Image (tube, rainbow, N blue to C red):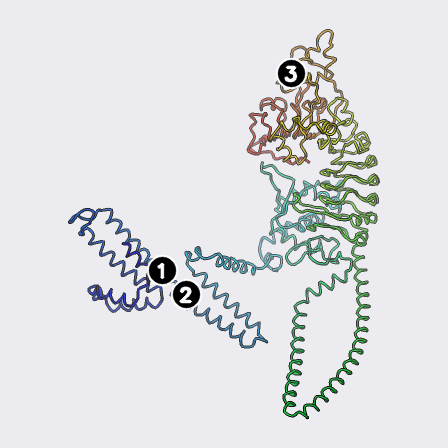
């Protein structure tokens, strides 16, 4: 058997075939003329020889298998038949060999079918080589290019007929070539932005155009804003609201009072845009556009001169095309270069580079031919004059005279040529200066009429100061990052160009979102008399605000959030009488502006505070005065950062106490989770409650306050509030309920508290004080419970979000009891809040009529 398997891998030679035929004369005599012809036909290709050889081995093996039961086996003794297992293995070998023969016959068909195409490919290659070798100096590249196309087409047809077995076992290089060919073939498909007539003939375009025409003029412009963003980009509602407000695309009048969300819903219904949903299924605050819809929107934006787009549908910072311009990532000079003529020349050279190279190549060829002719003439003369010495000497003298004459003529020509070249250079210089002046004038006029400048993809948006100051009529200046994530790093080395803000009196929306390298804004910021929105979010190197910010009388929105180095805010901020939203207000020991100064802002509706001062506390009942004096405040966010807890103060005072175990280190993994999700330094907790003022002692002390002498009740100053806590499970304490200490009522509708450093919550955080509160958020910190003044008091909160709270202990029944109006609960990493029917994302929503109510899941 081993010898047979070894022979299977060998091709039969002529001698082997002859010997085999002689040994099997009977089988050969039975073969007819037709079989002989088929054998000869099969042997025309190499695969046929393999099949003939295997057929012979198969017949021999099959015959041996039939005789096997009659043979004797050495293992079983003489005359005993072969065991059944041995016989079955022999039959299996015959079947497998038969299978191989059938498969090789299939390969033979491939080999036969491919023989003619391979010959054609060989002829194609010969034709190409013949064209290249016939005239190497003057190759007809057009003909060669056509021949290459024919060759590649024929090779593609052959590759399509290759068996799958060969393709899967081919080398890495072959797979790479196949993939490259596929990509090249796919790249030949027309781009939807370039090919005319692709969409116009279909019913989709007609329906789309009909829906677009039903929109108003301002709604159309709002929709075209999506065209400058890349495909599948998620655009936040916040950005669109600011942009539309800056360009006054959304006018609030008696006849038209549509909000931004209502306009976006109008775009969602016909399919212009799509909302982006979160993992929990709740609707987010971002929208995106389908690539096909974007292609049609880009076409409409081109027709309306709403920004400028290249042939591939990408926004371009080409000047003089539209009153709105984009900043995009580019290589080499651009229209923002100081020398506009240099950019024009560079662009023209890039466009005409190939023609110029070809012309230079032709000129060099002609000059080389002339030089070769002169050298040949000199060599011919030298050979001739060597036959006669006298004639050669005379010829040398004549040659020297001729060279001297030529040199004199060349010197004369050189001087004249230099003069001519100088005149030409002077003329060119004057023409260049004239052209430069025209282009510069045209560029200045364009910049003066520019309305919108939007940074789409430029990383270093540092513009020339002399050009930046020319944008006198600009309304929207968005230099920052529009993406939600910080993948695109943005930075400026010098902020002197921002001095040009002094000329932008009509600017309404200014954004430096996410730009590093800005430590302080220039004083020219105070010249923006019409500025409504100032976005400085995530300017990580910003350290202070200039006092000139108080001159922005029309400012209604100021975002300073995520400016972690900001430590100085002037008191002039209190002069912004129109301010409605203030995010990222810093309370630190270095900043002179306090909450008391902000109480003069009568129109302030939303306030976000970052506390970096340990002396500031909202725990005591007197702290309610900070917020009760705000007349219009409805949304409040308070977050504790570095330096905002007693822990950080003790560490600063006693840095040598390194052996003491910190509260944060005791928390272990929880502290790491908070640091990861909050993106803020987790500082742990500090014992702001006296040792006897823990939950159990506080409740006992408050209850003892009902004694006749009342000494213990006086010692426990805020027993009325502390008595009501979740740890007591809101059970009846016996006796009458204490009177609430707080009489003031806040108008807050949303309260967001993050990294609260104490276990006891603020004493004013009770339902009686916050009767209008609908949204309550707790994120991180050491708070131990959500208080109520007495067991009969209930919260009116509809949305409750609890994240990374390790000390609050309550169950689903207690949540329902305290929050009977609850419609949405989000619980993330709160191990002691149990039995809540939340989904995998930690969200529970009330259902009405079988439909889940979707609410804005992103805290604003």
Does 487 appear above or below 402? Answer: above
Element carrying mark 3:
helix
- Kindly indicate the quadrant of the structure image that contains residue 703: top right
Residue at the spot of label 2: 114
The residue indicated by pointer 3 is 696
Confirm whether residue 354 shows in the render: yes
Of the two numbered discs 2 and 3 on the same chain, state the one appearing first in sequence: 2
Determine whether the residue tagged by mark 2 lies in a helix, strand or loop: helix
218 or 580, nearer to the observer: 580
Classify mark 1: helix, strand or loop.
helix
Could you give the CA–CA distance between mark 3 and mark 1, rounded to whole angstroms? 88 Å
**Picture quadrant of residue 617:** top right
Q: Position of residue 658 (x, y in %)?
A: 68, 28
From the top left corner, tell me how far across and down residue 720 is, in percent: 71, 16
Do tag 2 and tag 3 residues touch (Cβ < 8 Å)?
Answer: no
Residue 66 shown left or right of residue 587 in the figure: left
Q: Nearer the viewer, residue 850 or 7?
A: 7
**Residue marked by disc 1:** 106
- In the image, is residue 268 above or below residue 687? below
Q: Is residue 629 above or below residue 6?
A: above
Disc 3 versus disc 1: nearer the observer: 3
Return the residue nearer the eye: 228 or 626: 626
Circle 2 packing at 10 Å, graded few (<14), some (14-19), many (20+), is some
Q: CA distance from mark 1 to mark 2?
A: 13 Å
At which x and y percent is residue 95?
29, 53
Q: Marks 1 and 3: in contact by CB < 8 Å?
A: no
Quadrant of the rendering where the N terminus is positioned: bottom left
Residue at image location 73% in from the left, 9% down from the top: 710
Which of the two labelled residues, at mark 1 and mark 2, occupies the earlier sequence position? 1
Q: Is residue 213 visible?
A: no
């Amino acid at each position: 058997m081993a010898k047979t398997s070894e022979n299977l891998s060998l091709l039969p030679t002529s001698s082997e075939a002859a010997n085999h035929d002689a040994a099997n004369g009977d089988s050969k005599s039975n073969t007819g003329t037709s079989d002989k012809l088929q054998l000869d036909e099969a042997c025309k290709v190499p695969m046929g020889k393999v099949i003939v050889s295997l057929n012979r081995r198969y017949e021999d093996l099959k015959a041996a298998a039939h005789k096997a039961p009659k043979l004797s086996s050495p293992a079983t003794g003489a005359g005993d038949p072969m065991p059944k297992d041995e016989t079955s293995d022999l039959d299996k070998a015959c079947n497998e060999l038969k299978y191989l023969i059938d498969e090789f016959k299939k390969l033979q068909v491939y080999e036969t079918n491919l023989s003619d195409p391979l010959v054609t490919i060989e002829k194609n290659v010969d034709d190409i080589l013949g064209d290249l070798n016939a005239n190497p100096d003057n190759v007809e590249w057009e003909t060669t290019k056509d021949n290459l196309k024919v060759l590649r087409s024929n090779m593609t047809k052959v590759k399509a007929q290759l068996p799958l077995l060969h393709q899967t076992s081919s080398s890495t290089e072959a797979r790479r070539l196949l993939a490259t060919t596929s990509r090249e073939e796919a790249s030949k498909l027309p781009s939807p932005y370039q090919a005319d007539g692709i969409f116009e003939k279909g019913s989709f375009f007609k329906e789309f155009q009909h829906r677009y025409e039903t929109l108003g003029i301002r709604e159309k412009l709002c929709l075209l804003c999506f065209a400058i963003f890349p495909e599948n980009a998620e655009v936040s509602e916040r950005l669109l609201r600011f942009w539309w407000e800056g360009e006054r695309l959304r006018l609030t009048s008696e006849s038209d009072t549509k909000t931004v969300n209502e306009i976006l819903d109008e775009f969602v219904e016909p399919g212009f845009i799509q909302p982006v949903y979160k993992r929990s299924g709740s609707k987010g605050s971002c929208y995106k556009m389908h690539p096909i819809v974007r292609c049609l929107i880009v076409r409409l934006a081109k027709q309306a001169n709403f920004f400028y787009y290249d042939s591939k549908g990408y926004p371009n910072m080409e000047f003089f095309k539209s009153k709105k311009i984009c900043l995009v990532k580019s290589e080499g000079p651009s229209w923002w270069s100081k020398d506009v003529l240099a950019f024009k020349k560079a662009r023209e050279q890039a466009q005409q580079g190939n023609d110029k190279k070809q012309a230079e190549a032709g000129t060099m060829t002609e000059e080389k031919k002339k030089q070769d002719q002169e050298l040949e003439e000199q060599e011919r003369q030298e050979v001739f004059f060597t036959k006669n010495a006298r004639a050669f000497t005379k010829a040398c003298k004549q040659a020297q005279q001729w060279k001297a004459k030529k040199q004199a003529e060349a010197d004369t020509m050189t001087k004249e040529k230099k003069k001519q070249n100088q005149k030409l250079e002077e003329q060119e210089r004057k023409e260049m200066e004239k052209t430069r002046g025209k282009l510069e004038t045209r560029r200045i006029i364009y910049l003066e009429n520019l309305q919108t400048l939007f940074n789409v993809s430029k990383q270093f948006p540092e513009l020339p100061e002399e050009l930046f100051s020319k944008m006198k009529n600009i309304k929207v200046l968005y230099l920052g990052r529009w993406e939600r994530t910080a993948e695109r790093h943005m930075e400026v080395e010098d902020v002197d160009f921002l001095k040009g803000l002094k000329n932008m009196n009509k600017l309404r929306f200014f954004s430096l979102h996410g730009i590093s390298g800005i430590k302080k804004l220039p004083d020219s910021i105070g010249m923006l008399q019409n500025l409504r929105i100032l976005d400085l979010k995530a300017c990580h190197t910003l350290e202070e605000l200039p006092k000139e910010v108080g001159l922005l009388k029309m400012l209604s929105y100021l975002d300073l959030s995520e400016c972690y180095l900001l430590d100085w805010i002037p008191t002039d901020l209190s002069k912004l009488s129109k301010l409605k939203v203030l995010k990222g207000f810093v309370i630190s020991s270095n900043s002179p502006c306090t909450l008391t100064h902000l109480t003069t802002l009568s129109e302030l509706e939303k306030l976000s505070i970052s506390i970096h001062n340990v002396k500031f506390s909202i725990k005591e009942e007197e702290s309610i005065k900070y917020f009760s004096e705000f007349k219009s405040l409805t949304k409040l966010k308070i977050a504790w950062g570095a330096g905002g807890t007693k822990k950080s103060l003790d560490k600063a005072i006693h840095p040598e106490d390194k052996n003491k175990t910190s509260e944060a280190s005791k928390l272990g993994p929880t502290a790491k989770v908070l640091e990861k999700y909050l993106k803020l330094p987790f500082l742990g907790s500090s014992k702001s409650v006296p040792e006897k003022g823990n939950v159990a002692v506080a409740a006992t002390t408050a209850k003892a306050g009902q004694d006749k002498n009342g000494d213990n009740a006086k010692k426990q100053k805020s027993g009325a509030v502390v008595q009501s806590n979740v740890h007591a499970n809101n059970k009846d304490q016996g006796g009458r309920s204490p009177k609430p200490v707080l009489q003031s009522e806040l108008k807050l509708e949303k309260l967001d508290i993050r990294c609260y450093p104490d276990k006891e919550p603020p004493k004013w955080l009770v339902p009686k004080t916050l009767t209008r509160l609908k949204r309550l958020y707790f994120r991180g910190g050491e708070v131990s419970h959500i208080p109520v003044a007495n067991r009969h008091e209930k919260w009116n909160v509809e949305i409750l979000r609890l994240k990374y709270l390790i000390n609050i202990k309550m169950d689903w029944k207690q949540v329902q009891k305290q929050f009977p109006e609850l419609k949405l609960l989000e619980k993330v990493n709160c191990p002691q809040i149990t039995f809540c029917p939340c989904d995998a994302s930690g969200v529970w929503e009330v259902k009405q009529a079988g439909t889940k109510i979707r609410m804005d899941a992103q805290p604003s």
